[in-house]
Amino acid sequence: MWGRLFGLVLFGILAAAIAGGAWFYSWAVTEQPSPPSHSVLIESGGVNSVAQQLVRQGAVDSVPLFVLLARISGKDAELKAGSYSLKVPISPWMLLKKLGKGEVDLQMFSIIEGWNWRQLRQALNTHPYLKHDSANMSDEEILAALGISALSPEGLFFPESYRIDKGSSDFKLLARAHRLMQEKLDDAWASRKPDLPLKTPYEALILASIVEKETGKAADRPVIAGVFTNRLRQGMRLQTDPTVIYGVGEAFKGDITKAHLRTDTPYNTYTRAGLPPTPIAMVGEAALTAATQPAVTKAVYFVAKGDGSSAFSETLDQHNAAVRKYLRNN
């Protein structure tokens, strides 16, 4: 009798286990409704934290069951943070595989050649898919958080279109852009022409930023860099309007005046010799190459022709004639 009773109990346990397993399997492979936002944002954390975030956002309906599924499958240590698109219903099992593979919903953020730091910060702070961790921080605090030792963040981030995880920190993007700028600057400095009037890679970056802002036509970049290189060698002032405008800052309203040119600031290259203290813009690879490999030219002057290109002159008389010709036509 006892043997028969034990057998019945064992059968009952086995039947319950089979039924429970079948029910659990059915739960794992049955599609659940898409969350209201059609996406989920998973921050870093263990499997319990991930399951809680999924339930909170409406992607699954049970924390314990999702945790059990992750642990049974061995994927509990593979779950990756990020934003995941869930535009169609998905089963807990397929969602678990998606999180394990890190199939995040990628967005784009572009840093534009010639942007200044103020424009970059504005773009960061208004991008809908970035987490704005730097929004309320000063420039000094941002540099410290990134581990950058510099007077200013200006020019330190490479213009490029970056793929970003939806909901990722703007610091992550800035760190990537800074690393890429350092790589590009190091490569340009290593390939520089001999006897440049530049002492450091940072000075090359400053000159490149001026070339970036002065160039209307790509083919003119090396020659414009050659003009500024000649001026530096000869001890001439650079006398470039973009640095003056940068020094005026947000007060600049679109028209440069004689008052602007006469007002001394650290960036006024009409009143001060040499390079300004920092770059004035974000610099592309072509401008870096031009600054470190300038064209060989005797020109020390240039003026915009009105079509995006420039007219170059070797003497002040030639330059004055070009100014009369092209500025009168404009």
Image: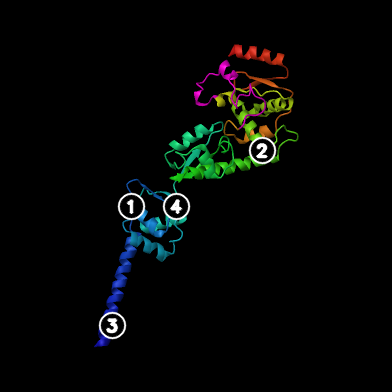
Residue located beneath label 2 in the image? 201
Mark 2–mark 4 distance (CA, rounded to whole Å): 37 Å
**Residue at 31% across / 72% down in the picture?**
17
Q: Disc 3 on helix, strand or loop?
A: helix
Q: Disc 1 on helix, strand or loop?
A: helix
Residue located beneath label 3 in the image? 7
**Residue at 40% across / 62% down in the picture?**
70
First of labels 1, 3 by sequence position: 3
Magenta residues span 248-277
**Residue at 34% across / 59% down in the picture?**
63
Verify whether residue 274 appears in magenta.
yes
Q: Are marks 2 and 4 in contact (CB under 8 Å)?
A: no
Q: Is residue 94 visible?
A: no
Q: Is residue 149 visible?
A: yes
First of labels 2, 3 by sequence position: 3
Residue 225 place in picture, x, y as percent: 67, 28
First of labels 4, 3 by sequence position: 3
Q: Residues within 10 Å of mark 1 (few under 14, many from 20)?
A: some
Image quadrant containing the N terminus: bottom left
Q: Main secondary structure of the magenta part?
A: loop
Instruction: Tell me, for residue 81, which label it has, or none.
Output: 4
Front one among 30 and 214: 214
Residue 141 place in picture, x, y as percent: 51, 41
Mark 1–mark 3 distance (CA, rounded to whole Å): 44 Å
- The amino acid marked with disc number 1 is Arg
First of labels 2, 1 by sequence position: 1
- The amino acid marked with disc number 2 is Pro
Residue located beneath label 1 in the image? 56
Mark 4–mark 3 distance (CA, rounded to whole Å): 48 Å
| On screen, residue 280 above or below 59 | above
Residue 303 place in picture, x, y as percent: 64, 19
